[in-house]
Each structure stands twice: as structure tokens, then as C-alpha cells.
Image (cartoon, rainbow, N blue to C red):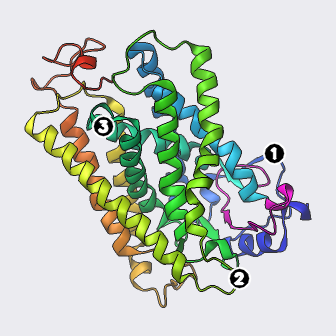
């Protein structure tokens, strides 16, 4: 059991309030009322229910509208998770202890897998974020107007803002804890490694969306519909290639990193990349909103998922942040009275503002000119065939 509970893992687990020595190798179930923090079971419900909602939406998109991208994204997200997560949890199993080391540990939630390292809600989190951000960007017509690459960049930006309102809060509420002794976690932005902010919160999802849209065909694709077998193998390829391309694109952020480095050069590089992403992402969001507002982009049939879930996601996280605010404001040197590190309040606030903008813009983009959703699959009210007009269609 020590092979799955090395000293660093045991130290982080002790900090979070559980023991990794007796963890079951396959899975475990706990009472949701006995978790470390009251927000944890609510977070599980939000994310797991969102993944189910996204799967139903993805299936309807494929079977009713003939668009397999949402379904491909849902399953590619799980394949990506299966490839990337085990080496992060157990680097010594893959001979990576000298290159990666122990990075972080999730706390124990109601349902856990893999020696208590992988909560069920994290399994659900990947398809939730990929679906949520893709649908918001697609609703604004960015994929239809500008293609897969630009649409993927816009999705990477959307992922950044929706991911970071979660990522900047988690350590304070003991949803997980980072290993402060791991060099990969340097430099930090408040309590969050900047590598996580860039690579996992943006690059990974942008790459995945680009691969899936390119392989399966994005909004407005024409030709013979893709069959189930073709959708399956293309989805597997996208899921497997995502971590490969992610590592390649993340390579510049490792420049100048060594045991003696204070991370100044790396911090500068990461802030530069994040700054560029924000500038480009805001411009694409503003352009999509302007086109929708002026009516130059035809409104799409209103999909329940994009109208309901993004707003719910933002609202529940806002409630979590409000509940955490007293301890956040009372923190000393970035640590609460309970001994947990806080995230960046101003960055989370900026992410909340942009996430809200995405939500409102998507609601505007999915309105029907007559105030009613067009019931005919494959068309939008008053626009005819959307594939000839650059519009998107959803159930």
C-alpha cells in the first residue's frame, strides 16, 4: 500500500484530513454528510448532474441534428482523463518520479476511485467543461464564421474563465491540495500553480476541441453523415492526441526551470501567454456579442443545455465564493485561520465577470426572433437551412 501512498502523498492527505494508507485500489463510497466541507456534496451534484445533462444534449445533437461533435467531445474528455490522470496521481508507477513527482491530491468525496485519488465528480468535470465552453462559443457563431482553430482558441479562453472560478477556490475549501515541495507547482499564482492555469485550464480543452471539430466536422459541415464506428475511432484519436499536443504546446512554459530557479522567467512567459489569450478571447467574445446584438448572426434554435447549465454553474460557484468570503478576507499572508491557502480574489472576479458575459451573450444568441424556439430540427426561425447561412442548430 505504501507504493500508492508515498511520503509526499501521505503528507498532503493528512493536511486534507484523510489517510491514504487504507485506500481501496478500485473504489470507495462515503456518506455525503461526512465530507470535509459542506460544499463538497453540492459540488458533486452540480458537476455530475451537469455531465449527465451534457450527455443527453450531445446524444440529441447527434441523433436529431446529425452533428456528432458534442458526443465526440464528451467521450474524448474521458479518454483524455484516462490518459493524463494516472501519471499525475502515481508518477512512480510510470517512472516519472524524478521528472514529475507528486503534484497534488484530491480530497475524498462521496465516490472515489484509484486508491482515493480520483473522485467521481472529477471524472464528470472534464466533459462538463468541454461541453459547456464549446456550446457557448458555438452559440455565438464563432466556429461557423472563423473555423475550428479560432473557435478552439475562443473555447480555450472560455475554459480559462469557467475553470478558474473553480480552481482559485478549491484549495481554500479543501477540495484538493497542491504539493508545495514540487518544483512543477512553481511559480504559483496565489494558491494555484500557473502551469495548471495555462496548461490544464486552457491548452488542454482548446486542443481537444480543435481535434474533435477537425476530425468529426464542426458546425455547418455538409456531406454524408458520419456513422457510429467512424465517430468512435475519431473520438479515440482525439482523446489520445490531446495530452500529446498539450505537452508539446506547453513546452515553452518550461524554459529556464530548474531546482535553483525562482520562476521569474517562467512566470513572465506564462503571464504573457495568459495575457495574449485574454486579449484574443475578449476580442472574439466582443465580436460574437456585437454580431448577435446587431442581428448579423442569425439566432440559433434555443438549446436547453446552453440556456440553463452555464448560468447554473456560475451561480452555484458564486454562492460557494460568497460562503468562503469571510475566511478569505480574514486570511493572513494568504492563509485562512483554518490553515488553508486562498486563491486570487481579483482574478476570480475577472473570470466571473467574463463568464457572466458569456452566459448572457449565449442567451441572446439562442433567442428566437419571434420569441419561440423553432421546432423543426435543422432549421432556425426565418433563416432556412443554417448550413447555408453559417448558423448553428441545437435541440
- Which sits in the foreground, 237 or 305? 237
Q: Is residue 395 above or below residue 180?
A: above
Give the magenta range. 91-116
CA gap, disc 1 to disc 3?
A: 44 Å
Q: Is residue 115 left or right of residue 126?
A: right
State the mark number for residue 259.
2
- Which sits in the foreground, 144 or 106? 144
Between disc 1 and disc 3, the foreground one is: 3
CA gap, disc 3 to disc 2?
A: 43 Å
Check disc 3 and report the residue beneath it: 146
Q: In the image, is residue 92 part of the stretch drawn in magenta?
A: yes
Asked which quadrant contains residue 295, the reply is: top left
Q: Is residue 238 above or below residue 335?
A: above
Q: Residue at x 64, y 47 (%)?
A: 244
Q: Residue 49, image x and y in percent?
A: 49, 39
Q: Residue at x 52, y 83 (%)?
A: 264
Q: Is residue 130 above or below residue 213?
A: below
| CB under 8 Å between discs 1 and 3 | no
Amino acid at each position: 500500500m505504501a507504493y500508492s501512498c508515498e511520503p509526499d502523498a501521505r503528507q498532503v492527505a493528512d493536511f486534507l484530513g484523510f489517510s491514504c494508507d487504507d485506500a481501496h485500489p478500485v473504489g470507495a463510497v462515503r456518506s455525503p454528510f461526512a465530507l470535509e466541507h459542506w460544499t463538497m456534496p453540492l459540488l458533486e451534484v452540480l458537476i455530475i448532474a451537469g455531465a449527465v445533462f451534457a450527455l443527453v444534449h450531445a446524444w440529441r445533437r447527434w441523433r436529431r441534428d446529425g452533428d456528432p461533435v458534442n458526443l465526440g467531445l464528451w467521450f474524448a474528455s474521458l479518454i483524455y482523463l484516462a490518459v493524463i490522470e494516472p501519471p499525475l496521481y502515481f508518477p512512480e508507477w510510470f517512472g516519472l518520479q524524478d521528472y514529475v513527482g507528486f503534484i497534488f491530491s484530491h480530497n475524498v468525496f462521496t465516490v472515489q476511485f484509484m486508491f482515493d485519488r480520483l473522485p467521481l465528480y472529477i471524472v464528470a468535470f472534464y466533459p462538463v467543461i468541454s461541453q459547456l465552453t464549446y456550446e457557448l462559443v458555438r452559440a455565438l457563431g464563432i466556429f461557423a464564421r472563423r473555423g475550428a482553430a479560432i473557435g478552439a482558441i475562443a473555447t480555450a479562453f472560455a475554459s480559462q474563465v469557467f475553470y478558474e472560478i473553480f480552481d482559485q477556490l478549491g484549495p481554500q475549501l479543501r477540495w484538493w491540495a497542491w504539493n508545495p515541495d514540487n518544483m512543477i507547482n512553481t511559480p504559483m499564482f496565489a494558491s494555484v500553480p500557473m502551469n495548471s492555469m495555462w496548461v490544464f485550464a486552457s491548452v488542454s480543452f482548446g486542443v481537444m476541441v480543435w481535434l474533435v471539430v477537425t476530425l468529426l466536422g464542426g458546425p455547418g459541415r455538409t456531406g454524408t453523415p458520419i456513422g457510429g464506428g467512424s465517430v468512435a475511432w475519431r473520438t479515440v484519436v482525439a482523446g489520445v492526441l490531446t495530452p500529446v499536443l498539450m505537452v508539446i504546446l506547453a513546452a515553452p512554459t518550461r524554459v529556464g526551470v530548474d531546482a535553483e530557479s525562482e520562476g521569474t522567467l517562467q512566470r513572465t512567459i506564462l503571464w504573457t501567454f495568459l495575457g495574449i489569450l485574454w486579449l484574443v478571447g475578449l476580442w472574439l467574445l466582443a465580436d460574437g456579442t456585437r454580431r448577435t446584438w446587431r442581428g448579423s448572426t442569425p439566432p440559433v434554435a434555443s438549446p436547453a443545455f446552453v440556456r440553463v447549465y452555464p448560468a447554473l454553474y456560475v451561480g452555484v460557484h458564486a454562492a460557494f465564493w460568497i460562503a468562503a468570503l469571510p475566511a478569505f478576507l480574514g486570511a493572513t499572508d494568504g492563509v485562512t485561520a483554518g490553515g488553508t491557502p486562498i486563491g486570487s480574489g481579483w482574478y476570480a472576479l475577472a473570470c466571473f465577470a467574463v463568464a457572466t458575459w458569456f452566459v448572457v451573450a449565449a442567451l441572446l444568441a439562442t433567442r428566437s426572433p419571434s420569441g419561440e424556439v423553432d421546432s423543426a430540427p435543422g432549421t432556425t426561425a426565418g433563416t432556412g437551412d443554417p448550413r447555408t447561412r453559417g448558423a448553428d442548430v441545437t435541440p
